[in-house]
Amino acid sequence: DALNPKADQRYMVTPPAGPITLVCCATTKGALSIAVHPNWAPRGAARFVAMVKSGYFSSKVPLFRCVRNFICQFGVAGDPSLNKRWRGFKDESTLEYGDGTHGENFSWLPLGPTHRTNELGVKRFSRGFFAFAGGGRHSRSNQFIVGLGDNDRLCGGSPWEVPWGEAVGGESFATLGRIYTGYGEKGPSQGAIGKEGHSAADAFPLLDFM
């Protein structure tokens, strides 16, 4: 139940409950429905929905770094002019939850290397979770990761990687399973896509797009 998720075989801990926004995307491997949870990450959820409403993803966004059973990274616009419009924004804050005593660095998932699984072995970042791709505090901008497998190593353990949404429905998970991962870490570079747009992916004919 996407409206009232509970800790179980999918969720390491019980996520914040609340309304969702359903975003239906088209990819070169099929439909992908994303349940956006504002209560999971208010700032991250709002940024993604704003990008969708702006038509950002109509620019043909490459899924440029897809590693089997790990993650797929995407988000650099197919139209280079769009990237400049979506600069970095701050990490989540407890302020959105009525608690101003802890400042920034909110995450509904346990943070740090010692909290990778729960007592049942459920991993922190589940297959189908969506988060921003960041590299430090307040580093989120226009790039995303989606889990292609359950992961306890890198994803979800930092406040800038707090999940804000998840894939829902059997067809969405089938789509995730069809995304091409053969290029792995050796797909087109972020810099090249940022400068040249989706034409930078011409040398990678099997690459998928959103």
Image (cartoon, rainbow, N blue to C red):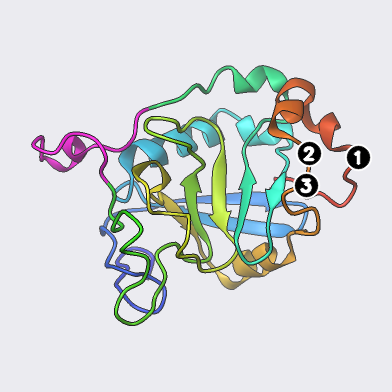
Give the residue at x 37% y 51%. Answer: 37
At mark 1, the secondary structure is loop
Characterize the magenta stretch by its predominant secondary structure.
Answer: loop
Mark 2 is surrounded, within 10 Å at the Cα level, by few (under 14), some (14 to 19) or many (20 or more) other residues, namely many
- Specify the farthest residue to the front: 114
Q: Name the residue under label 2.
A: 188
Is the C-beta separation of discs 1 and 2 under 8 Å?
A: yes
User: How far apart are the two marked residues, 1 and 2, measured between alpha carbons?
Assistant: 8 Å
Amino acid type of the residue tagged 1 in the rendering: Ala
Would residue 30 appear left or right of 119 to someone viewing this image? right
In the rendered view of the protein, which quadrant contains the C terminus? top right
Q: Which of marks 1 and 3 is nearer the N terminus?
A: 3
Label 3 CA crowd tier, 10 Å (few <14, some 14–19, many 20+): few
Marks 1 & 3, CB-CB < 8 Å contact: no
Q: Determine crowd level at label 1: few under 14, some 14-19, many 20+ residues with C-alpha closer than 10 A.
A: few
The picture places residue 33, in percent across and down from the top left corner, at: 56, 57
Of the two numbered discs 1 and 3 in the rendering, the one whose residue sits closer to the viewer? 3
Element type where label 2 sits in the image: loop
Q: Where is residue 26 in the image (x, y as percent from the top left)?
A: 69, 50
- Residue 124 in the figure: left or right of residue 72: left
Nearest to the observer: residue 64 or residue 14: 64
Determine whether 206 is above or below 13 in the image.
above
Which residue position is annotated with label 1?
A: 203
Give the magenta part as a residue range: 90-106
Residue at 26% x, 59% y is 17
